[in-house]
């Protein structure tokens, strides 16, 4: 059944890919984005690729009155909430900014939803809510406890939504805990466009490959893993986007409540394996140097995605090679992302 879905942060990396899946499934999409860390060109790409138009509200999710207007104007049925800051290091130096934007933003959104009798939300969470897991793979029943202000904002948002769903039995909440998103849309015209120096492995690797950076720093090769570098569960952003659609379908079809799901592949890949896969996709070696460990990194993290498979009928199907090929197609067609030239200070 066709619905009108509000996607906050819909111009961002995961948000934009999710918009495409929602449109392909026949839903109408309203994007709410302040474009603080995203580009209106992502919206153009969504419309171009899907052949459909989307409504856009350039609004900060914390602006209650403006968000309320969006709900009234478009008759929103359900929300997929991405809009948030997401850099772990930055959250350590600017904690108030993170609490205010991420937790304050969710509070404002939920209050507006309540006032408009819209009680169906898919929330963008992270495997960071598991902190330093005692073992792998991680299931949803592992103890929760984040280690950075960013992580704590995700955990607080989960707690708020859990409490809201407990207090009113008609709330339907899906908490999606992502592992490590990578890749891009297969068209090569929609992908990740980080501002400044990328924090994450894949965008950094690809900026080295395209010549924007000299070499990758591999943070530590003395971890207790098969090649000494950290293991992560990289998941193709399109698989992740399809996971949101599956969660939304299930949420709309099933009864009320609040549930959390891991969105990962169940397979771990080391940093050096990722470098090798990227080199294969790019067709030449990618220069790297081994450096000290990055503070806060955990040796190995990967998901047990069984619950999402069983309950949502969702499974990641794309491989590490697919992620590298698609990410490279995007990066090589758009060396500077959605901009036309090298951004100042990058
Ligand atoms: N890495 C490098 N060099 C780089 C960047 C990363 O060697 O330039 C390594 C990291 O040390 C780590 C791996 O690549 O071993 C993955 O690092 P990312 O920064 O890409 O991803 P993380 O697993 O550290 O972080 C991700 C999300 C966060 C989230 C965290 C929770 O990006 O939002 O998982 O575990 F908080």
Image (tube, grey):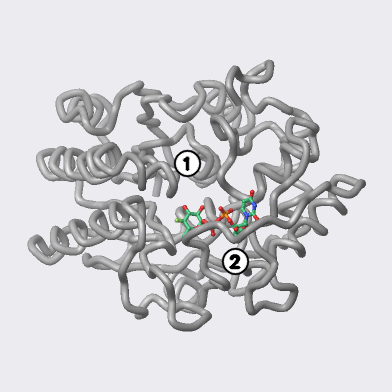
188 to 149, vertically: above or below: above
| Residue under the image location 22 percent in, 65 percent down | 256
* Separation of residues labelled 1 and 2 (CA atoms): 20 Å
Mark 2, residue position: 233
Extreme bottom residue here?
A: 135
Residue 32, image x, y percentages: 35, 30
Left or right: 181 as drawn, with respect to 249: right
Which of the two labelled residues, at mark 1 and mark 2, occupies the earlier sequence position?
1
Going 25% across and 27% down the picture, which residue do you hit?
70
Q: Is residue 331 left or right of residue 144?
A: right
Q: Secondary structure at mark 2?
A: loop
Q: Nearer the viewer, residue 254 or 291?
A: 291
The x, y position of residue 231, in whole percent, is 63, 69
The quadrant of the picture occupied by the C terminus is: top right
Instruction: Give left or right: position of 244 versus 21.
Output: left
Using a 10 Å C-alpha cutoff, classify the residue at mark 2 as few (fewer than 14 neighbours), some (14 to 19) or many (20 or more): many
Give the numbered dot on residue 15: 1
On the image, the x and y values in percent for residue 225 come to 67, 77
């Amino acid at each position: 059944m066709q619905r009108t879905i509000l996607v906050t942060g819909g111009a961002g990396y995961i948000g934009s890919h999710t918009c495409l899946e929602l449109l392909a499934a026949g839903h109408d999409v309203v994007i709410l984005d302040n474009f603080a860390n995203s580009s209106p060109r992502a919206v153009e790409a969504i419309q171009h690729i899907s052949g459909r138009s989307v409504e856009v509200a350039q609004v900060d999710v914390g602006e209650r009155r403006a968000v309320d207007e969006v709900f009234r104007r478009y008759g929103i049925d359900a929300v997929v909430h991405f809009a948030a800051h997401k850099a772990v290091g930055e959250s350590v130096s600017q904690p108030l900014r993170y609490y205010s934007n991420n937790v304050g933003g969710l509070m404002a959104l939920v209050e507006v939803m309540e006032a408009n009798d819209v009680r169906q939300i898919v929330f963008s969470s992270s495997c960071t809510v598991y902190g330093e897991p005692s073992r792998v793979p991680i299931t949803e029943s592992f103890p929760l406890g984040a280690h950075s202000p960013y992580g704590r904002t995700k955990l607080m948002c989960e707690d708020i939504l859990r409490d809201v769903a407990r207090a009113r039995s008609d709330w339907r909440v899906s908490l999606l805990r992502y592992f490590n998103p990578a890749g891009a849309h297969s068209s090569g015209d929609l992908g990740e466009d980080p501002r400044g120096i990328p924090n994450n492995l894949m965008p950094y690797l690809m900026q080295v490959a395209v010549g924007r950076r000299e070499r990758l720093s591999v943070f530590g090769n003395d971890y207790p893993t098969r090649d000494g570098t950290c293991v992560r569960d990289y998941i193709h952003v399109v698989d992740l986007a399809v996971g949101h659609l599956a969660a939304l379908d299930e949420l709309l079809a099933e009864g009320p409540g609040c549930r959390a799901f891991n969105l990962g592949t169940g397979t771990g890949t080391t940093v050096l394996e990722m470098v090798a896969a990227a080199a294969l996709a790019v067709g030449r070696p990618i220069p790297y140097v081994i450096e000290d460990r990055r503070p806060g990194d955990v040796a190995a993290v990967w998901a047990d995605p069984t619950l999402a498979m069983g309950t949502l009928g969702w499974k990641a199907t794309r491989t590490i090679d697919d992620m590298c090929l698609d990410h490279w197609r995007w990066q090589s067609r758009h060396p500077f992302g959605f901009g036309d030239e090298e951004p100042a200070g990058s």
